[in-house]
Amino acid sequence: MTYQNLTVLEEERVLTVQINRPKYMNALSFEVLQEIEDVLDYVETNDNIRVVIIMGNQKFFSAGADINQLKQLSNAFSAYEFSRRFHKTFSRIELLKKPVIAAIEGYALGGGLELALACDFRIAAEDARLGVPEISLCALPAGGGTVKLARLVGILKAKELLLLGEQITGREAEKIGLVNIAVSREKVMSKAKEISQKLCEKPAKAIEQIKVLVQSSVDMDLEGALLMESKTLGLLTTTDDFKEAISAFFEKRKPVFQGR
């Protein structure tokens, strides 16, 4: 796989996707978004890939939307379409059947942070800088930031981040629940790989269904979400991996999952 803006490495059931636009601080252009979707197309059809890691470089995870494309917005409809283009790609990540890990070093700002918010796990360097500075441009993070931040860290903290536009460190992001864990910069990728290997050992069907449940239940009433949960358990009990897990439990051995 060859891309203009991404460097992709497939190794031990894990696909690592590095945004590679250092001249533009790894800004997310429409071309970058399309290439990310092309990668997701490949991941969806490759059963050997179990986990995706998205990363930038030591200076920038991503500085956000490409300002050169942002300045071309000439009317309300073009701005609306601009926002929806980001929603499309980030939704693809959220709906992917396989877990996605954001490995954050350097700056993750605006659309860059929103990209990370679409991932299932966020591992940040303690000295990483995260924020949504769009308020300074008389704008807002329209790739899902205003919605997802409130759900993740609560309305009070979300308003602080959105209205002041100030950056916080990876360490501070961990404290408010914006990232899973903050580690020293040199350990970010090793931690992401550690988590990815743990995920590779879990049953793929269960991971897929849990992702669907968690993502769907946000927009459902409680009773509907609970009903969906019960139905999903019923579905999982018909899989070969469920039967293997039960047999392994009673035989006191490690299960061998086949993704069936």
Image: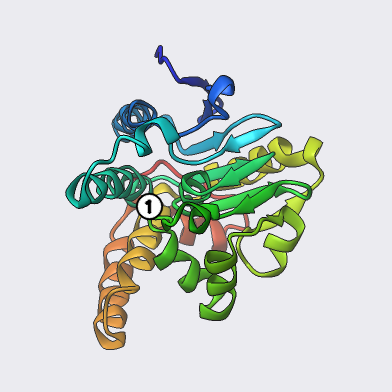
Quarter of the rendering occupied by the C terminus: top left
Q: Is residue 107 left or right of residue 184?
A: left
Residue 129 spot, x, y in % from top left: 69, 48
Q: Is residue 196 visible?
A: yes
Q: Residues within 10 Å of mark 1 (few under 14, many from 20)?
A: many
Q: Nearer the viewer, residue 139 or 119?
A: 139
Pick the front one: 53 or 256:
53
Which of 216/63 is in front? 63
Q: Residue 127 in the image: state x and y as whole percent.
A: 78, 47
Indicate the position of residue 157 as horizontal and vertical percent values.
59, 74
Q: Which residue is mark 1?
A: 143
Left or right: residue 52 versus residue 174 is left
Quarter of the image with the N terminus is: top left
Residue extending farthest to the bottom is: 223
Up/down of 45 relative to 91, above or below: above
Q: Residue at x 37, y 45 (%)?
A: 93
Residue in the picture at 82% in, 44% down: 184
Dot 1: element: loop
Residue visible at 36% across and 37% down in the picture: 71
- Please indicate, yes or no, whether residue 66 appears anywhere in the rendered image: no
- Left or right, residue 106 beside residue 27: right
State the image coordinates of residue 255 (x, y, percent, origin top left): 54, 49
Q: Is residue 226 above or below residue 199?
A: below
Residue plotted at (21% across, 52% down): 76
- Quarter-of-image position of residue 191: top right
Q: Count the numbered circles shown.
A: 1
Q: Nearer the viewer, residue 177 or 45?
A: 177
User: Residue farthest to the top?
Assistant: 2
Name the amino acid type tagged 1. Gly
The correct choice, above or below, for 167 with respect to 7 in the image is below
